[in-house]
Each structure stands twice: as structure tokens, then as C-alpha cells.
Amino acid sequence: MPRYPKTFDDAATIADAIIDRVGKKIVLALPLGLGKPNHLTNALVRRAMEDPSISLRIFTALTLEVPRPSSDIERRFMAPVLKRLFEGYPELAYASALHAGTLPQNIQVNEFFMQAGRWLNSPRQQQNYISANYTHALRYVLETNVNVVAQLVAPAPARDRFSLSCNPDISLDLLQARREGRADFIFAGETNFELPYMAGAAEAEASEFDLLLDSEALQFPLFAPPREPVSPTDYAIGLQVASLVPDGGTLQIGIGSIGDAVGQALVLRHRDNGAFCDMANRLDVRGDERGRFEEGLYGASEMLVECFIDLIEAGVVKREVDGVLVHGGFFLGSRTLYQRLRDMTPQQRARIAMVPVAFVNELHGDEMCKRAARKKARFVNTAMMATLTGAVVSDGLEDGRVVSGVGGQYNFVAQAFALGDARSVVTMRATRSKNGKATSNIVFSYGHTTIPRHLRDMVVTEYGIADLRGKTDGEVVAEMLSIADSRFQDQLLAQAKKAGKIAANYQIPESQRHNTPQRIDTALSHARMAGLLPLFPFGSDFTEEEVALMPALGRLRGASREDLLKFVLRGGPETAEARRGLERMGLATPRSIKDRLYRRALLAALAS
């Protein structure tokens, strides 16, 4: 007879049971992202807040929080969206208390990857951050002498097995360490019926669990962040990257709008090859991989991003490795993603294998088979900035503050060099904008590095591909200048010449002197008009009215104070479409001077 865990239907009771078993010094390991058992975690946090003699250390990553609008106009737009997507989702108590400054000192939260930008202004969390590659987090958890591991799980009907579903990433290796006597902890689960039941390696027998919180009354909707709109800049990057992916190869993609742009570009390359090639020619794309996918791709991706399912359905991802199309370490996405996974047959889900993160992020362990499977790999990841000499900045600022974390980016760069025919492809937008002012994301130097320049490979912006591997510093500087925004090329070139990093007589070729947003818009305008580059290529969490508002709200968000004043003074016509937008934003019948100003600015933005 299998051993079943002790089951509870009340979070406070299971928290008390944990304290009874391990005592008042609790080292709690929680999965990254979606896999956190919110009710169980909150109950332990409340116990520690009520009893200062309890020491609670939480080791985790990517604490998911409902977005907080930063302005009144953003609140007007996002409030109904957030209500639709997150109503009923229980916020993590330790995160709320940290923001409020009320988390007592007997509770410590250590993250090795943060929700981007969320803790930039929290000295406490900046000090408690642990810098780690994703694959090294297991080692650090074991070194903390973890005594409780807790996870959200999908139950089998008989409760004889459970799926770790979205997060087998480190948990499977922790359980293996416990079986081998290298760790001693309580494994506690909390069931969630919305979690897709991913079988295979992601399953754990009931006997692995010591305690289980299993109650219909405590079910909650999974965290489902709204999908990001894909801009022309993103699409230009995606088209560049798609031209680097060989048929029969291996693909890793990161989360976000650039990842979606890469996915859509690959779908177009396969399904509408003529249109893809035309767009590539208009953008002067350097990559020469432009044919349809006959053999198809295999996915080995740290994160199972949503577009992998679309790539499978489009016939792009179809190269199987041991019967599997995609191996992933964790997933997080829209409600549609979770529903699509739940709706699959067991046979279909089996072709999407959730495995330990060490399987996808490392070559160690069955290395010969991994090398054979990961032929012609392209590991695509996103960065914030890069230097002229090829160092990449993805996770932190010059003053040492952490924006997010290294995660698995370094792992994939290292793999790209370890595999004979693989490449690391780092993507980033050439500029960023704040208060209407553009700043270059390619800089001469920077006081923080995520990927050192001795591992420089390929860097892609909307303006092109910089192939840096094996090049001299002077050649690398020239390559990086070729993909920089032309508004900043002269300044960057002058800095490089002053430092002696490029020949004093070097001139940027005329063909590379037209890197402007206007050129990108012109090159892709026909495809956008034809519907080939939609704002949401793989589905939207927004209504038609909300999608129609997005371009105008984007203009307002990126405007300087001077431009905002011009919008207010200019105003715009109240067309039927504009009226729908005003009603959605609560500005159809303004009740204050501020409302009237918002109304005029929005009408102007809609008209432009």
C-alpha cells in the first residue's frame, strides 16, 4: 500500500503541523514563480508575525505580485483588467508586508531572481538578494539546511500521484537529494485544480509528500500576467533573430514581447515565406536562414513560453527528441496557456515535458545524448544594455541595485560555447525612452556586467545583427556601432576613438547611418497594414476597446511634459471610436479639471 501524506483542509492547521515537526527555526524553500503554495505560505508567515520567537527564512525566486498602476491614467486603464485577471488571487503576505515596511525581522526573504524592477527601491530586499545562476540555486538551498519545501501541485484523481506541473525546476532535484540522504526536510503540497497535470518527470508519488493542504474551499485562480503588446521595434528584432535559426535546430526563447515577436517571425517564415523574406529584405536582415521548416525545431527552454505551443501548432517545432518536442523547466503565462495545456490529451501533453531545470540549462548528466539532441542550437535571451566591446547587462544597475537576476542566461551562453554549432543570441532594443527622451542601450562602458565580454557572441537590435564571436575588440566595436541607433553613433564612436578601441580614421559606413525608428516603421508598415504583425500575435487578454486605446496611451506614457502640454492644448475630434475610448477610461463626462485635461490629451493622442 502506498504511503499517503497527512491531509489538511485548513491552512493554519497545516502551518501548525509544520512548526510541530521542525520547531521554531524554519528554513522554507519555495519554487520560482507560479508554483508557490500561497495559502500555506501565508499561514506560516502569519504564525511568524504573531510569534517573534519563530525564525522564518524563505528561499525563493520571482515572487509574483499583481501589477500596481503608477499613475491615475494607468489606473483608469488597468483597474478593470486587473480585476478580470486577478480577482480571487491571494497575494503573498510576505511581499505585501515588505512593501508596507511591516515584515518583522524574524522573517527573512532571500530571492535569487526578482520580479523585474519590483524591489529596486527596497534596501532590505537588495541586501537579502542572493546572486546565483538558476542551476546553482539547488546547491545554495541545500547549504541553508532547508527543513521545509512547499509547492503548489496538481492532484491525480486518486491522490496517489501529484504533478509538480509548472515548477519541477529545482524541486525534483531536492527530492532526489532527500532520497540520497543529502537533505532532510518536510515536503508539503497545496493542491490547485487549475494547474495542468504534466506527467512524466514532473510527477511525484504520494509517498514523497509528508503534508498536504487539499481543500476545495481554498482553490484560487492561477497568477496570469497580461500578455504584452508587440511593437514594431520588437518585430524588427524578431525578424532578425528568425533569420538566424536553422531548420533542424534547437530553440530557447525567453519571456516577453521580444520572445513573442521571435515566435511570430518563425511562424511567418514557415507559413508565409514570401512575406517573411520581403520583410527581411526591407530591413536589410543579415541572417541567411530564410527557408520553411522541413525537419522542424526542437525546444530546450528554461521557460516554456506560450508561443512554443503556437510554434508546435504551426508546424515549426516538430523535431522530436525521445518523443518530446519541448523540454522546459517551468512555465508562467496567460490563463489561455493554462487552459490550452489542460485541454490537451495526455498524449499531446507528453510531447511537452516539464523536467528539472538542470536538464535544460546544463549539458552535465547524459551529456552525449544532450549534445546529439541540441544540434544547431540558438539560445535567445533578452538584455537591458550592452557595451561597445560586447559585455551584456541584463540584471542590475551600475550602482549595484538588482533589477531581476541572472537566472539561466549565463547557463545558455555557456552552452552556446560548449556546443560545436550553437550560438547565443542576446536581443535588446537599441534605445529606451523616459519622459520623451531617448537613451541608447548600447553604451561605451558600464559598471555592472551579467555576461562578460569574453563570452560575447551575437547581439541583435532592431537595426541588425552584431556577430561578435572570435572578433578583435576593434571589430566588435564596429559591429556594435552598426546596430546602434544613429542618434548616438557619433558619440559612441568618439568615445571608442578616444580610448583607442577603434582606428582613429574609422568611419561608420553610410549604409549603417540610417538606424532610426522611422526606418523601422517604414520597412514594416505594409506588413502591419496586411495584419501580419498584430499587436498580440498569440492572443490578447484585453478587450477590443482596450487594444484600440493602447497606441494612444503609449504615446502619452512616452511623452515629455512639453509634449503632454501640446496634447492638452491640441485636443482632438470626438469620433465614435474616440467616444468608446473615453467611456472605457471614465472620461466621457469629465467631473473635474483634471478629468478635462486627461480627456483632451487622450483625444489628441487618439487622433495622432
Image: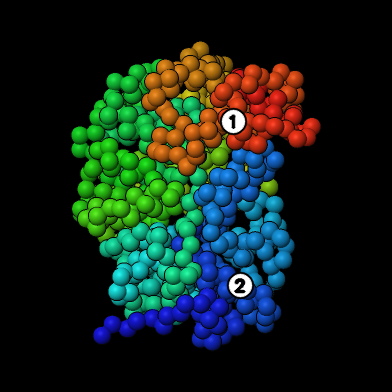
> Closer to the camera, 372 or 544?
544
Whole-number angstrom distance, CA of label 1 to CA of label 2: 43 Å
Residue position marked by numbered label 2 in the rendering: 45
The answer to whether 400 is drawn above or below residue 466 in the figure is below
Q: Residue at x 39, y 45 (%)?
A: 306
* Residue 565 relative to residue 132: left or right: right
Give coordinates of residue 138: x percent, y percent.
45, 66
Q: Which disc is residue 331 wearing?
A: none
For the N terminus, the quadrant is bottom left
For the C terminus, the quadrant is top right
The answer to whether 177 is drawn above or below residue 385 in the figure is below
Q: Which disc is residue 581 wearing?
A: 1
Q: Residue at x 69, y 67 (%)?
A: 103
> Closer to the camera, 497 or 489?
489
Q: Are marks 1 and 2 in contact (CB under 8 Å)?
A: no
Q: Residue at x 70, y 32 (%)?
A: 589
> Can the viewer see residue 145?
no
Give coordinates of residue 415: x percent, y percent.
37, 48
* Element marked by disc 2: helix
Q: Residue at x 53, y 69 (%)?
A: 39
Q: Residues within 10 Å of mark 2 (few under 14, many from 20)?
A: many
Residue 471 sits in which quadrant?
top left
Q: Amino acid at mark 1?
A: Gly
Q: Amino acid at mark 2?
A: Val
Name of the residue lying farthest toward the right: 593
Q: Residues within 10 Å of mark 1 (few under 14, many from 20)?
A: many
